[in-house]
């Protein structure tokens, strides 16, 4: 099968490349936090595309920081052990045994796969967990019921971020490395906490004063009740979508993390379709808008 790129006339190719120039200039030296999840993590072709995109961003002077999830991989490992995962308001209930599985799947398997992919594409990736350099301090999450705030849910070793010390990430960035962060925090007694990766990405973007937070998902973005893509949303519009149930399930922590980041100074938050090859490059370096952009106002 011939590569479709070979059929693009040279002048059109030049136009496409030139279109990226103002964006490269604008974002040179800036940090972008990328939450890597969904199909983009499990489809081999999309994995390779993602790794190439991250390396290209680094080579043109943008500093990507990758935060990854691993829901399907955790689920598969739990199934092998005969354990069934269950969720409350989009958060995985995590007992001690599940926490062990979460740690070895995220930090041992998924993270190292991503590091390997980026290195294979010509980058220099380094894997981190919340323990490395005291990156993510956490405490047990106290989760109130969405419909009855007086009712509290116990979701086990699920963490709420107390603080993020970005020193180790900044040191790696300044030295041409690409940090790959597993969303595991540690508490006062050195206990481990499973933290929602969207929440970690949002908080890390805020602390690093990132230019953009990009969330790769299995949806085109935020959809209205008729399944139409909403390309631009303000905080107030999002509150309305929460209230009428348009945003629910696994999208809840994603949007909450995105909204917090937008309100805390991250210039733009994008929720994009990770199933589209090179969607991240298209979103960041071209005029074409993919997915949903969230702004504070």
Image (cartoon, rainbow, N blue to C red):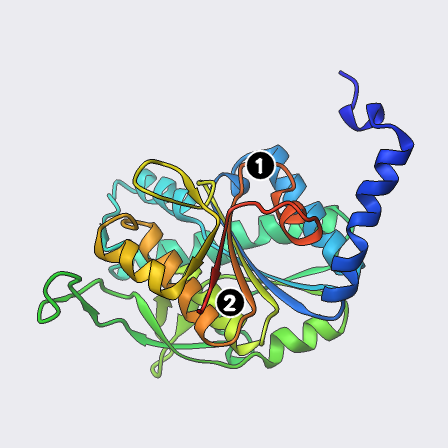
- Crowdedness of circle 2 by 10 Å Cα count: few (<14), some, many (20+)? many
Which label number is shown at residue 45? none
Locate residue 155 relative to residue 190 in the image: left or right.
Answer: left
Question: Cα distance, mark 1 to mark 2?
Answer: 28 Å
Locate residue 217 relative to residue 174 in the image: left or right.
Answer: left
Q: Residue at x 84, y 42 (%)?
A: 15
Q: Quadrant of residue 33?
A: bottom right
**Which circle, 1 or 2, is nearer the viewer?**
1
Which label number is shown at residue 276? 1
Q: Residue at x 91, y 32 (%)?
A: 10
Which label number is shown at residue 129? 2
Locate residue 23 relative to residue 223 in the image: left or right.
Answer: right
Residue 148, image x and y in percent? Answer: 10, 65
Residue at far top of view: 1
Residue 243, image x and y in percent? Answer: 22, 57
* SS at circle 2: loop
Residue placed most toward the observer, 99 or 54: 54
Depicted 66 relative to depicted 175: above or below = above
Q: Residue at x 60, y 34 (%)?
A: 44
* Residue 92 visible to the viewer: no
Depicted 164 relative to depicted 283: above or below = below
* SS at circle 1: loop
Residue 281, image x and y in percent? Answer: 67, 48
Quarter of the image with the N terminus is: top right
Residue 130, image x and y in percent? Answer: 48, 71
* Residue 86 visible to the viewer: yes
Residue placed most toward the observer, 109 or 135: 135
Circle nearer the N terminus (1, 2): 2
Residue placed most toward the observer, 143 or 261: 261
Quarter of the image with the C terminus is: bottom left
CB-based contact (under 8 Å), mark 1 and mark 2: no
Locate residue 71 relative to residue 29 in the image: left or right.
Answer: left
């Amino acid at each position: 099968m011939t590569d479709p790129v070979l059929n693009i006339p040279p002048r059109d190719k030049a136009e496409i490349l030139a279109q990226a120039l103002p964006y490269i200039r604008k974002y040179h030296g800036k940090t972008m936090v990328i939450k890597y999840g969904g199909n983009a993590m499990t489809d081999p072709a999309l994995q390779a595309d993602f790794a190439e995109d991250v390396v290209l961003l680094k080579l043109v002077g943008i500093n990507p920081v990758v935060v990854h999830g691993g829901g399907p991989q955790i689920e598969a490992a739990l199934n092998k052990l005969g354990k069934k995962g269950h969720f409350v308001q989009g958060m995985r209930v995590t007992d001690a045994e599940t926490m062990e599985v979460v740690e070895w799947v995220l930090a041992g398997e998924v993270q190292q796969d991503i590091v390997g992919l980026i290195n294979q594409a010509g980058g220099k990736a380094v894997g981190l967990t919340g323990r490395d350099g005291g990156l993510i301090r956490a405490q047990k999450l106290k989760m109130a019921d969405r419909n009855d705030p007086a009712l509290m849910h116990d979701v086990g070793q699920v963490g709420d971020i107390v603080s993020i010390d970005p020193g180790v990430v900044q040191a790696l960035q300044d030295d041409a490395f690409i940090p790959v962060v597993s969303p595991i925090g540690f508490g006062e007694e050195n206990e481990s906490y499973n933290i929602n990766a969207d929440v970690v990405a949002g908080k890390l973007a805020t602390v690093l004063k990132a230019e953009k937070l990009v969330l790769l998902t299995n949806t085109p973005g935020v959809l209205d009740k008729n399944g139409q893509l909403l390309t631009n949303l303000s905080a107030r519009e999002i509150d309305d979508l929460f209230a009428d149930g348009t945003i629910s399930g696994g999208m809840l922590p994603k949007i909450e993390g995105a909204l917090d980041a937008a309100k805390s100074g991250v210039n733009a938050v994008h929720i994009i379709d990770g199933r589209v090859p090179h969607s991240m490059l298209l979103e960041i370096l071209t005029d074409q808008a993919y997915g949903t952009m969230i702004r504070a106002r």
